[in-house]
Amino acid sequence: MITDLLIGLPAQRPGGVALTLIIAIGSAAGALLLGVVYAAICVGAPRLSLTLQAPMALLRGVPLLLLIFALAQLTSLPLVMAGYVALLLYSLCHVGETLRGYLASYPPGLRDQSRVLGFGWAREWVTLRLPWTLRSSLDALATHWISLLKDSGALAVLGLGELTTVASTLSQNADVRDWELIIGLAGLFYLSVTIILIQSLKFLRRRLPPQEAMVI
Amino acid sequence: MLAYVAATCVLWALSGVLAVSTGFALAAGAGGTSRAWRWLSNGGITLTRGLPTSLLVVAAGVISIRIPPQSWLPDPFPATPSASGPVAWAVLLALALGSAGHFAVIFQTAYTALGRARVEQSIVLGAPPLRRLSLLSREAATAAIPPTAARLVHHLHNTAFAALFPVADLFGWIENGANETFNITRFVVAGGAVYVALSGLIWAGFKAIELRLRLPRANAKARGRRLAPAPDGAP
């Protein structure tokens, strides 16, 4: 049972905790990359910004379950890929907006400093703008990533073998005492992963230089 | 479709009220003077924030699906068969628990944002505890409203998990309609539009409350500027 919860049911491996982590980390990383591009376009080209923000706002109004269902039913993507793309889009519409907000509040003092130091556009973005934006938005991003990890349980609607699906399948076929144990263990796994993620982010926050240190 | 929209609204409203009340109780317990209450409330917050709503709903559904319908249970859920009453109530409780911890953190943060000085001011004023609570709640509301609205939109989206069990809701209507008619686009677009509209209504409602709360303060500032005496030598 523990093996099934950790790596999935025999017919659906990788699954369980492993699939939950793969999909959550993959979609969070993809959304972060695309979110940076989205935020940069919005800040760099304000005219294009409204055109991009409208679909993002609409997407935020659609439940993740509906997004997963729509992608699985309306596209020819394999179920795992449909689930991944749905989580990626869901994450992007939240992360993108967060990054856009922080990027827009980039202090003019830092921009002036980079000019004085003779930095070009690309160098300023890589050495100052992006690190400052990511550092400032880390708390908001951390909250979203924890939520994303938990929301990956919505993939159960497709019957994908992630942790919630495995727990649900095992508990529906189990005796009373067993399903209590199964649900309890699944909850414990989610809780452990969430706590590890929170502690890692706290560690990362301590390791990163404070925002004030970036101002020369 | 209207019955399913109503079912989603009922699920959202009842579980939302329960979640906000539990969140308030957890936040109050976590900031209280009793060590046991603080420990219990913090444990409750960590647990409800760390567990996914999907798993809570699955657990509630698996437990309650074996319970026969009870005549004393009220049946406020439109389009849900009365035999599924216990499941519907269990799903409602699970949805409320899934959001309670998040609301507790929002309320704690808003209270912290008030600052020590303002809390002490309210004590010095000598108002009775209930008056003080109402005053501080009003002050903290401006900080708490935007994240509360965001969480209530998320809460609305979480009601879709009810479709995992025989409990009527909008997502269940979309899923069943799409599977029965194979007209997936029609059901997805119609259901998605209703979800977007409901989310928009929540945002707009909370924006209106936020503006209403900010207006008296802005008016008072403007009055204060008008009444302030001009400095010496000023025209």
Image (spheres, coloured by chain):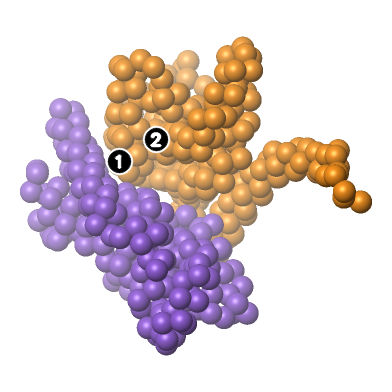
Chain in purple, by letter, is A
- Please state which of residues A2 and B200 is positioned toward the viewer in this rendering: B200
Q: Earlier in the sequence, mark 2 or mark 1?
A: 1
Question: Would you call the spot at circle 2 few (<14 residues within 10 Å), some (14-19), or many (20 or more)?
Answer: many
User: In the displayed structure, would residue A137 be above or below residue A40?
Assistant: above
- Percent of width and height locating residue A182: 17, 37
Question: Would you call the spot at circle 1 few (<14 residues within 10 Å), some (14-19), or many (20 or more)?
Answer: many
Regarding residue A137, the answer to whether it shows in the image is yes
Q: Which residue carries the number 2 mark?
A: B101
Mark 1: which amino acid? Gly
- Percent of width and height locating residue B80: 49, 36
User: In the displayed structure, would residue A117 be above or below residue B74?
Assistant: below
Q: Secondary structure at mark 2?
A: helix
Q: Which residue carries the number 1 mark?
A: B50
Q: For residue B42, which quarter of the picture?
A: top left
Q: Is residue A92 left or right of residue B44?
A: right
Write the residue at 63% across / 14% down.
B127
